[in-house]
Image (spheres, rainbow, N blue to C red):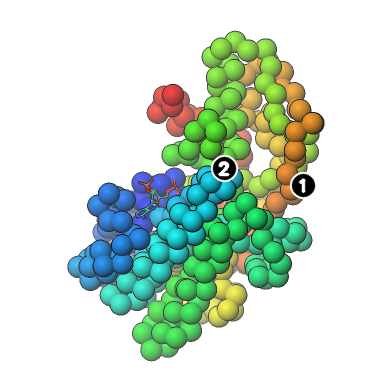
């Protein structure tokens, strides 16, 4: 069988770089990549020209405009416009150049704010979204529907088979450690690391520590992506529906923020005390994905939280993040 030529869009990002590592470790040598500076995926003409010239066989769409609550609130126009454009350009140009398999990466924020827990795939479009990242979530929902619509219109005639995965919170090498704009695990790593280096006696965490969250190591996410894109059409179709086709990718278990903080403190070697400021808001009590669909399709994670935190902190130290 011919070795597929694979385009990983967003290969320098946290998830895209993990997908490249995973594909390379599995012996895939024909990888095509472009940096943001080389190919702006919001530029339709450039994206069409790129696909027409390269003609990849498979595409992982891990490029996106991504950010935390602050960035989503400050730049809502950029979040909805850029993500809609990236997806529409890549999916359509992929179709025009004959790509049969594509994997679109979304996010758990596609689910309604009040979705029952754990969140199942069929919770999609059953309620209103969390307002702070609604523009981003709407773009991601449109991405799922783009894939499904191309499958429905061009599946039988052109063999188009575009799939979507919705990851839970991810962490690992290549994460963003920005002091004001990072997710919870990199933020905690930085705070405990700085507290240890500065000899501080205690670290205070916002909220009660009671909310529960789910975290998946990014190389496990990449492995799940490779697993899903390579499932046979029959197996994928058996476990999805044409208009409910996305697959959750979770760890399967969650932890309290208190448990997480203790685990990060241990990993970093912080010996002071950890306190919780209950006067600060907690956020949603629980966010947890139902990953039964993916388990039924034969995939589960292999890196537990302690091991993942160790590897992530080693990467943080290696890159000497300021
Ligand atoms: N990280 C998480 O916890 C998490 C959780 C759930 C879902 N996801 C999903 O996973 C996907 C990847 O996320 P990530 O965490 O890997 O994000 P990331 O680290 O920010 O990577 C995104 C990549 O996309 C590139 N990019 C952005 N706009 C582009 C454009 N117009 N043209 C070309 N390249 C562009 C970025 O390049 P520049 O940096 O140069 O702009 C970056 O390399 C996203 O769809 C996200 O929703 C992530």
Instruction: Please tell me whether mark 1 sits on a helix, a strand or a loop.
Output: loop
Q: Mark 1 or mark 2: which comes first in sequence?
A: 2
Q: How many marks?
A: 2
Residue highlighted by disc 2:
70
Label 2: which secondary element:
helix
Residue at 44 percent across and 45 percent down: it is: 14
Q: Does residue 18 show up?
A: no
Q: Quadrant of the C terminus?
A: top left
Cα separation, mark 1 vs mark 2, equals 20 Å
Does residue 97 appear to the left or right of 313 in the view shown? left
Q: Position of residue 292 (x, y in %)?
A: 66, 63
- Looking at the image, residue 11 sits to the left or right of residue 110; the answer is left
Quadrant showing the N terminus: bottom left
Cβ of disc 1 within 8 Å of ligand 1?
Answer: no
Q: Which residue is tagged 1? A: 285
Question: Which residue, as the protein is rendered here, is positioned at the far left?
Answer: 53
Q: Which residue is more in the foreground, 62 or 142?
A: 142
Count residues near mark 1 (Cα–Cα under 10 Å), then give few for <14, some for 14-19, many for 20+: few
């Amino acid at each position: 069988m011919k070795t597929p030529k694979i385009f990983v869009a967003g290969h320098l990002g946290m998830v895209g770089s993990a997908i490249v590592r995973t594909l390379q470790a599995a012996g895939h040598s024909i990888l095509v990549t472009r940096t943001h500076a080389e190919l702006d995926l919001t530029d339709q003409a450039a994206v069409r020209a790129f696909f027409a010239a390269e003609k990849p066989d498979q595409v992982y769409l891990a490029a996106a405009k991504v950010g935390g609550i602050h960035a989503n609130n400050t730049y809502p126009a950029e979040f909805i416009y850029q993500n809609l454009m990236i997806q529409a350009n890549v999916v359509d140009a992929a179709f025009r150049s004959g790509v049969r398999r594509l994997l679109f990466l979304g996010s758990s924020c596609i689910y309604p704010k009040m979705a029952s827990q754990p969140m199942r795939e069929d919770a999609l479009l059953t309620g209103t979204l969390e307002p702070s990242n609604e523009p981003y979530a709407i773009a991601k929902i449109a991405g799922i529907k783009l894939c499904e619509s191309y499958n429905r219109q061009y599946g039988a005639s052109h063999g188009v088979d575009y799939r979507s995965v919705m990851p839970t919170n991810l962490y690992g090498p290549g994460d963003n450690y920005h002091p004001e704009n990072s997710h919870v695990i990199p933020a905690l790593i930085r705070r405990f690391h700085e507290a240890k280096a500065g000899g501080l006696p205690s670290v205070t965490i916002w909220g009660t520590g009671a909310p529960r969250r789910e975290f998946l190591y990014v190389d496990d996410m990449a492995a799940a992506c490779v697993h899903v894109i390579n499932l046979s059409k029959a197996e994928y179709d058996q476990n999805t529906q044409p208009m409910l086709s996305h697959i959750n990718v979770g760890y399967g278990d969650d932890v309290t923020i208190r448990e997480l903080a203790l685990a990060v403190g241990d990993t970093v070697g912080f010996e002071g005390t950890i306190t919780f400021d209950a006067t600060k808001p907690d956020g949603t009590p629980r966010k947890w994905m139902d990953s039964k669909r993916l388990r039924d399709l034969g995939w589960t994670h292999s890196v537990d939280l302690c091991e993942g935190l160790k590897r992530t902190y080693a990467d943080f130290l290696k890159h000497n993040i300021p």
